[in-house]
């Protein structure tokens, strides 16, 4: 047993496993509910803007973006991608979307709307609603619109205003954005009531919103603890625990308690100077989505003393804001979601870094988490998750003399990430990080 | 400075050296404001005596400088624009008005704003949908733009001035449509190549100057005897931005005349007038959010519908293409997009479905916005033209 423990370079959080089990159980419960005929929505990740409402309306929600990952891991994605290609979708489009097109084409054309037998994790049943979102990426509403080729399912597109950094601070703009979102959400609720033939239970929505806000606050506090040296929680635990917040998987009350357990364990580690890896030589940030299919490469890097202390901005909970004085649950949702997108704009404005929501947070992270290097993982078929990385690389060097290593990969096409190649670059990058540690010291930085 | 050339020759001259006129105007004391996409309301700039100047890429030039801020697998047009900006090709601009039309543009301009200093820069958020709340939000965004433009120009923008600018731009739209009417005869009186040169010239000079140029072009084209030759194929092109005549020449050197188009270097900016509303910003908001036809906007056949009819959806989104095809007697459609354009990439199979339902032959072409792509495009265009001929 002791030998087995020694083999593990990353000390995973014990409290993460029950949360992960809740996430996995939620997939299974969802499949069972769908098989029992419960209406299903396919939703784009929406930073809680629509999820909370769907949950309160008791719709089962599946995420084709997430399902793309599942298909890739199960080795099914390639056949769906081929099918999307044959149906005329350009090969440069988002891998998740092409996976969905191929899957839906097969489901509708060959199985009359029933789940294809090879579909992993229970598959995605034919939905009653496609909930699109215009946050961050055009694909996330164009893709659902294009699914009209295969099935006559209504699409609702959630609006997300996103002014420029300077423009956000013009008089009245912030509140205008909130009002716009609230109006849209009210329309969305009315639409859902018509679609489902039942009324929203506002008390359930109220409670779900509050729990979601608290859940995100606790999860944020967990990540704040990771600023400690040595960092008590590795990125692998982040990626394992993240879906319960990001997708609101599982019962939100239960997951809130499980996040509190994680907080307690991480706090214990901080108080006792316990790191997530044996010897923390280098602290790193990881951006964007990790290569789900090759997560073992993190262990190899951990053996070299690489501790991943912070990850992609987009998957982190927002910086908490006090919403206790906001009585309308739709407005609380709007403010939570908006904060997730513009929460760093004030700093960005001061520092004249105008890529305020996808780029600038990495500069804040560098200073607060004091990382030595950034591992940037551009995703070939997910341009929106990769566009900012060159800029991040440039900004980190320009502002804080932190170097980056860029290793291309993908979220669906497994062939595009080569762990051996990534590992072969580790040693030279360590030399680079050592060099810039000296440079930062010479220039008066405190790490 | 009075132009020595006129009409088509003048348009060609401006096309070949776009910054020249802008720099002359700058030397005369005008402020030049760049905009990379037709979602930036030029009327507001014109009304404040600023010169709106469309930022285009250059497909003949590698985009090495863009590596500083953008990945390689990214919209090549935006990469080209950033490359030109970083190397100083747009240094004569006094400011920028950029709109959140597509994500590629939105993200590029944030990088641009960080890496290229400019005395004035305004980012205009544009909703993805055309709901009433979206229109209201967008209208308020236009009011913010008005404020920063006023501050930059150092003068107030009155409703009357804005209305006069809208009228001038509407006149330009009307003249462009008149120019496109000259492509209805067989053979067309003006080629696609010439049309692109004119449009690109219009997007490089003040509106009144452009209107004068259009009048000259229309008169010249009506009178000349050496226009395009009759050819068996009369094509429509639906496309992401086309800003280089090489892409049009490929078609017109085959046995085809390009008679009408749907892209933002062609009809898209000109096909409907801005309505002259009591508050002119109402008309602008409606025009730029609802009436511009770019795939970047999510359109529904019926807002809030709880069922979906695919063919009704296609008809509501692409019915205008049918009107183009009928009006210009089109017998084939080229669907073209640069690689990594999500908006056009997702749209292409659906517009293909629509064209198939109309029985209109069509083909989808993709390229990387480089000269190297032209040979392969030429082969595919020739094959398509032979097929429909």
Image (cartoon, rainbow, N blue to C red):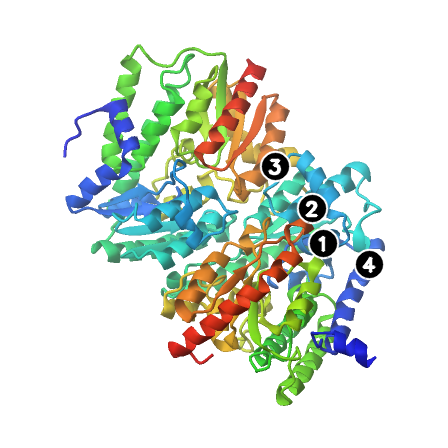
Spatial separation of the CA atoms under disc 1 and disc 4: 17 Å
Spatial separation of the CA atoms under disc 3 and disc 4: 31 Å
Q: Secondary structure at mark 1?
A: helix
Spatial separation of the CA atoms under disc 1 and disc 2: 9 Å
Eyeballing the image, is B25 above or below A402?
Answer: above
A63, A171: nearer the viewer:
A63
Which-is-in-front pick, marks 2 and 4? 2
Which-is-in-front pick, marks 2 and 3? 2
Residue at left offset 58%, top offset 16%? B387
Q: Are discs 1 and 4 both within one chain?
A: yes
Q: Chain of mark 2?
A: A
Tell me whether circle 1 and circle 2 mark residues in contact (CB < 8 Å). yes
Disc 2 marks which residue?
Answer: A99
Badge 1: residue crowd in 10 Å (few <14, some 14–19, many ≥20): many
Percent across and percent down for residue A358 are 50, 61
Residue at left offset 30%, top offset 31%? B15
Disc 4 marks which residue?
Answer: A33
Disc 3 marks which residue?
Answer: B313
Report if residue B169 is visible in the image: yes
Mark before the other along the chain sequence, 2 or 4:
4
Disc 1 marks which residue?
Answer: A67
Q: Is residue B265 left or right of residue B216?
A: right
Q: Quadrant of the rendered structure where residue A91 is?
A: top right
The quadrant the N terminus of chain A occupies is bottom right
Spatial separation of the CA atoms under disc 2 and disc 3: 23 Å
């Amino acid at each position: 047993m002791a030998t087995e423990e020694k083999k593990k370079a990353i000390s995973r959080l014990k409290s993460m496993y029950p949360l992960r089990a809740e996430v996995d159980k939620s997939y299974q419960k969802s499949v069972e509910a769908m098989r029992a005929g419960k209406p299903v929505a396919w939703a784009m990740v929406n930073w809680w803007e629509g999820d909370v409402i769907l949950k309160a309306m008791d719709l089962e929600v599946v995420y084709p973006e997430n399902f793309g990952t599942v298909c890739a891991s199960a080795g099914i994605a390639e056949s769906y991608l081929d099918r999307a290609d044959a149906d005329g979708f350009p090969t440069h489009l988002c891998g998740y979307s092409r996976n969905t097109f191929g899957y839906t084409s097969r489901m509708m054309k060959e199985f009359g709307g029933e789940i294809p037998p090879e579909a992993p994790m229970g598959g995605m049943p034919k939905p009653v609603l496609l909930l699109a979102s215009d946050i961050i990426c055009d694909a996330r509403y164009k893709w659902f619109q294009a699914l009209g080729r295969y099935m006559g399912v209504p699409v609702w597109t959630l609006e997300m205003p996103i002014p420029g950094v300077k423009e956000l601070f013009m008089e009245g703009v912030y509140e205008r954005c909130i009002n716009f979102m609230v109006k849209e959400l009210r329309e969305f609720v009315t639409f859902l009531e018509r679609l489902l033939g039942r009324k929203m239970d506002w008390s359930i929505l109220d409670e779900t919103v509050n729990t979601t806000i608290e859940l995100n606050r606790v999860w944020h506090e967990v990540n704040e603890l990771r600023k400690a040296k040595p960092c008590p929680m590795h990125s692998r635990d982040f990626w394992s625990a993240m879906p319960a917040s990001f997708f609101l998987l599982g019962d939100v009350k239960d997951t809130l308690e499980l996040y509190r357990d994680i907080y307690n364990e991480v706090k214990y580690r901080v108080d006792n100077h316990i790191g997530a890896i044996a010897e923390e030589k280098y602290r790193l940030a990881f951006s964007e989505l990790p290569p789900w299919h090759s997560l073992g490469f993190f262990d190899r890097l951990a053996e070299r003393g690489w501790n991943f202390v912070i990850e992609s901005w987009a998957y982190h909970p927002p910086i908490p804001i006090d919403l206790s004085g906001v009585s309308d649950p739709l407005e609380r949702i709007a403010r939570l979601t908006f904060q997730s997108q513009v929460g760093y704009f004030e700093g960005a404005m001061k520092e004249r870094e105008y890529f305020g929501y996808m780029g600038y947070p990495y500069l804040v992270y560098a200073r607060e988490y004091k990382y030595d290097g950034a591992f940037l993982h551009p995703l070939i078929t997910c341009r929106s998750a990769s566009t900012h990385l060159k800029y991040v690389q440039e900004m980190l060097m320009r502002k804080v003399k932190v170097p980056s290593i860029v290793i291309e990969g993908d979220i669906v096409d497994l062939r595009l990430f080569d762990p051996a190649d990534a590992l072969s670059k580790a040693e030279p990058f360590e030399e680079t990080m050592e060099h810039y540690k000296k440079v930062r010291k010479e220039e008066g930085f405190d790490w | 400075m009075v132009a020595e050339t006129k009409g088509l020759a003048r348009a060609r001259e401006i096309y070949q050296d776009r910054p020249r006129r802008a720099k002359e105007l700058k030397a005369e004391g005008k402020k030049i404001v760049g905009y990379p996409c037709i979602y930036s309301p030029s009327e507001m700039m014109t009304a404040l005596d600023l010169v709106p100047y469309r930022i285009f890429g250059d497909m003949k030039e590698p985009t090495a400088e863009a590596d500083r801020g953008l990945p390689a697998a990214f919209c090549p047009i935006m990469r080209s624009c950033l490359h030109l900006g970083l190397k100083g090709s747009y240094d004569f601009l006094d400011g920028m008005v950029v709109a959140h039309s597509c994500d590629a543009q939105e993200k590029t301009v944030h990088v641009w704003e960080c890496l290229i200093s400019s005395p004035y820069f305004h980012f205009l958020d544009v909703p993805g949908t055309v709901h009433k709340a979206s229109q209201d939000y967008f209208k308020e965004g236009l009011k913010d733009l008005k404020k920063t433009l006023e501050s930059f120009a150092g003068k107030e923008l009155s409703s009357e001035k804005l209305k006069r600018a809208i009228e001038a731009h509407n006149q330009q739209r009307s003249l462009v449509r008149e120019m496109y009417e000259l492509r209805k005869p067989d053979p067309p009186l003006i080629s696609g190549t010439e049309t692109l040169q004119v449009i690109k010239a219009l997007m490089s000079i003040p509106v009144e100057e452009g209107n004068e140029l259009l009048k000259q072009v229309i008169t010249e084209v009506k009178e000349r005897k050496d226009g395009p030759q009759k050819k068996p194929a009369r094509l429509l092109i639906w496309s992401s931005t086309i800003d280089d005549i090489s892409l049009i020449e490929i078609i017109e050197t085959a046995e085809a005349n390009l008679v009408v188009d749907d892209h933002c270097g062609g009809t898209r900016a000109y096909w409907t007038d801005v309505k002259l509303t009591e508050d002119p910003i109402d008309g602008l908001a409606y025009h730029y959010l609802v009436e511009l036809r770019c795939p970047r906007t999510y359109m529904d056949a019926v807002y809030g519908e709880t069922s979906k009819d695919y063919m009704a959806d296609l008809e509501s989104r692409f019915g205008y293409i049918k009107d183009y095809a009928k009006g210009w007697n089109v017998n084939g459609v080229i669907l073209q997009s640069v690689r990594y354009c999500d908006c056009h990439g997702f749209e292409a199979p659906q517009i293909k479905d629509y064209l198939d339902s109309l029985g209109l032959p069509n083909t989808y072409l993709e390229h990387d916005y480089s000269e190297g792509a032209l040979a392969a495009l030429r082969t595919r265009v020739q094959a398509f033209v032979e097929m429909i001929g």
